[in-house]
Amino acid sequence: MNTRYSDKNPLILRILGTAGKALILGVACVFTAFPFLWMVLSSLKTKADILNTDVFFPPDPQWQNITSILFDSPIPKYIFNSMWVSLAIVALQIVSGAMLAYALVFLKFRTNRILFAIVMATYMLPVAATYIPSYIILADWGLLDSFGGLIISSTVSIFGIFLLRQAFMQIPKGLVEAARMDGASHWRALWEIVCPMTKSSFITFGLMNFIGTYNNYMWPSLITKTSDYFLVSQGLRAFFVRDGAYGTEWALVMAASAVVVIPLLVLFAFTQRWFINGIGGETGMKG
Amino acid sequence: MSEIILKHITKEYENGFLAVKDVNLEIKDNEFVILVGPSGCGKSTTLRMIAGLEDISEGDLLIDGERMNDVAPQHRDIAMVFQNYALYPHMSVYQNIAYSLKIKKVPKSEIDKRVREVAQSLGLEGLLDRRPGQLSGGQKQRVAMGRAIIRHPKAFLMDEPLSNLDAKLRGQMRVEIADLYQRLNTTFIYVTHDQTEAMTLGTKIVVMKDGEIQQIDSPANLFNYPANRFVAGFIGTPTMNFFDASCEETGGQVVLQTDTGTIRMNDKKAAALKEGGWIGKKVAAGIRPEHVISAKDGASKVFEGEVGVFELLGSNAIVYLQTASGRMVMNTTDLREYTHGERVALGVMEDKVHIFDPETERTVTN
Amino acid sequence: MTVSGGKRRYQKRYDRLPTVLLFVLPAFIPLLVFWIYPIGRSIFLSFTDWDFISPTYKIIGLKNYLSLFKNPRFFEALWHTLVFTAGTLIPTIVLGLILALLLVRSFKGSGVLKFILFSPWITPTVAISIVWTWIFKADGGIANTILTALGASPLKWISSSDTAMLSVIIVTIWKSLGYAMIFYLSALEKVPGELYEAGALDGASRWRQFFDITLPSISPTTFFLMIITMVNSLQAYDQIQILTQGGPSGSTRTLLYMYYQLGFQEFNMGQATAVAVIMILLTVALSVLQFKASEKWVHY
């Protein structure tokens, strides 16, 4: 065991180091995971058990809490709304974003730089500042309280344009030119050459924006008032505050939250690497 | 079948830079045209304007008599081989070669037949399933050419296609391109900065500099009858020796007088010099290294040089000398050893002297 | 130069402008309608007395701003915004970096840990804020049960104006910690690996290495995270809406929440848009400040 470094870094210090590391990570993970755990545990408790903090694990899991949310509440409808509205929005965002990013990188036109500056400037501004006039626009178009209004007001993602532009800039211009010489239009060059080469950015874009739209709360809650059009966040809140009373049905509220959250965690488990690589690796960060 | 004509073509970038100035060029069917010149001379820009990848600022581009300025590249029916191959990394070799036919909606069986034909002619049969990332430089080069060949286009454009290869492979691919040209019977337009490629491949060479055409001619004419000092210096290795001389007439004989000797002008050169009114004036003269000879071989002494470096290349040798008229390079087949510092009396093959106007650098007589 | 007949297909024009428009407009029109125009419109509305219901309005100059500046509620909200921004930004970045440092060398189970730490970021803030409301419940909430078990006295959390902001900050850190960690992980992976050679460095020089090499080389990421976390914090709404609705007694009312209350509860559009304009200015000011400061400590 007498390696060259052992005297500098004695075993005892290394054990302490590892223990400290484990402690910090352990605390962080418990802190992070606990709300999820508590949500699930609470969702399975009876009305009596849930108010008794001495009961940590549900002694008699109330699975009917979950089934009543699944079959007997509007929550699945909200999930469905969120699902298809988000898919529609993300599809539009990908098409419009990819086209604009393609134009910014591969088409030559005079206002190229100005256009990018505008896009970048809007990226940092608080979205909320746009809400009142956007609300009025949707009201004028008769699109308040409708899926159309939800979708049409979110067809562009500035984050996505930025992400794709960064990715497209890595592609040698010659490849697009080669495609053009091979007879491809710009449209085909975008979807048959550029898109497959930047597939991971497209996936990251799609997943991030899907999650963002799916979870979005403030804007949808401002423009939809009828529960038929609620997305999941707004629906969950409505479920939470229904009958004007907070917290009379904690177990059911927790069950509803669990029904909303767990599918997302499963989706995330399968797509984790796209988030992790996409967020950290491909947003054009130097260093 | 295809004739490409450039009429007063000019390219001006938005920042006002004139990349190509008033280029006029006629390319006939089946010609192998080389655009050659130092980097930044506008040769690539010219090629890209023919391809449609750059806008033409002024002038007309005609292909088979039709004005093509505003036609998109995909509708010009021209193929191009790019410097860094520009193979689609996410497609196999097969898909790369087939892509243009797929766009044209050629039937699958027809595509398959043609891909296999092309692959065979380029020795790519075994590589069809590979991705470009798994290929060597030479193989990528072949795929890039296959992608162009398969379309039977009106013309092939090649932008420095060999510059990414090592010297040995470059020589080999040069032969293959020449072979391809013989087989395909199509127009080739080829951009290079390498004059060896230009001289060996081209049937017609366009020498460019600073966006302007300097000379359009066959390889032999370019070598023997350069239109100006730039072309004379650009074509040929080692490059032509230039020196100052004064043109004089003594007893009916026109001669060039250098600091250390005289060169007699033959009748043709003498007439041209007289006609241009050069008698009694300074001229710029040039002589190719292979036309510099030892004064002992019966030639009269023109220069006296001190040997600097001596390179024996096998069948010939290159001798670098310092003379009163500047540095001089001699390409000789006389394979005796020259030693550093040795003084040598040099003559020239008098018929081979080129004379340029020292102001405009245009050729007075070749 | 005869123009031969059957070649009309090559006559197809390429008309650069239509191509450019075709590619730009699908994103640019929505951008114009739902981003650029509304921001301009907000600025305009902030100089009017529009109440949303009446069809007419008067231009009243800076009156909205002046009445905001006379309103203690506004300064409270501004202060809460700054406290909330600083209170979320600093811990998120510091803790995110610590976690990334501990996880950058992968070991058995590190993937699972990354998964757990990042998962709050992908879950709906509303759902998880509801869970936290339950955790923070003053009597019978698990947070107080744990505090009591640890020997500390229980807190009133979101039902007291003393601790409500702290509660909202905890939830926000909980949610964004993993996000910062992921950014730092990829930045740390790009730092030359020899710095992390196990055991090759003794304790003291390891710290030196960290401050002299690691920190400077990940400074662009730190800078990026500061900007992003700041922008996110300035716009935090979901957790405040669920946990406290800006209360108790306005103790968690940020500028954004004030904007929401003025605009969508009181329909005082003039003042609401004035708050929005101030938020824009604040974002710009803080960004400029950070960009200026970054020249001193960010090393690209």
Image (cartoon, helix red, strand yellow):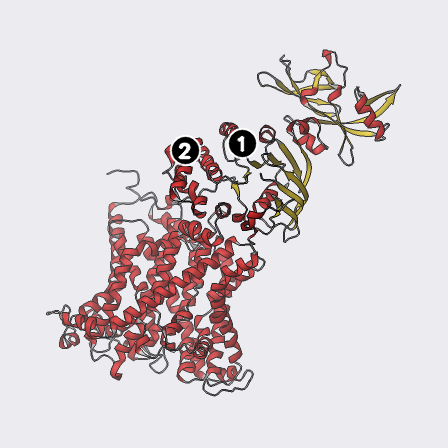
Q: Chain of mark 2?
A: B
Looking at the rendered structure, which numbered label has been put on residue B124?
2
Helix, strand, or loop for circle 2?
A: loop
Does A192 sit left or right of B54 as displayed? left
Can you see residue A66? Answer: yes
Does B60 sit left or right of B153 as displayed? right
Can you see residue C148? Answer: no
Image point (74%, 11%), residue name: B298
Residue A35 position within the rendered picture, expressed as x and y whole percent measured from the top left: 24, 67
User: Furthest-front residue in view?
Assistant: C5
Helix, strand, or loop for circle 1?
A: helix
Which residue is disc 1 drawn over?
Answer: B181
Q: Nearer the viewer, residue B298 or B156?
A: B156
Type of residue at label 2? Answer: Leu
Does A196 sit left or right of B348 as displayed? left
Tell me which label, 2 or 1, sits earlier in the chain. Answer: 2
Residue B165 position within the rendered picture, expressed as x and y whole percent measured from the top left: 49, 33
- Measured along the vertical axis of the image, is residue B145 above or below residue A129? above
Tell me which corner region of the image, top left, top right, bottom left or bottom right, holds residue B217: top right
Question: Could you confirm whether marks 2 and 1 are on the same chain?
Answer: yes
Q: CA distance from mark 2 to mark 1?
A: 18 Å
Residue B283 position within the rendered picture, expressed as x and y whole percent measured from the top left: 80, 29
Looking at the rendered structure, which numbered label has been put on residue B281?
none
- Measured along the vertical axis of the image, is residue B178 above or below residue B107? above
Type of residue at label 1? Answer: Tyr
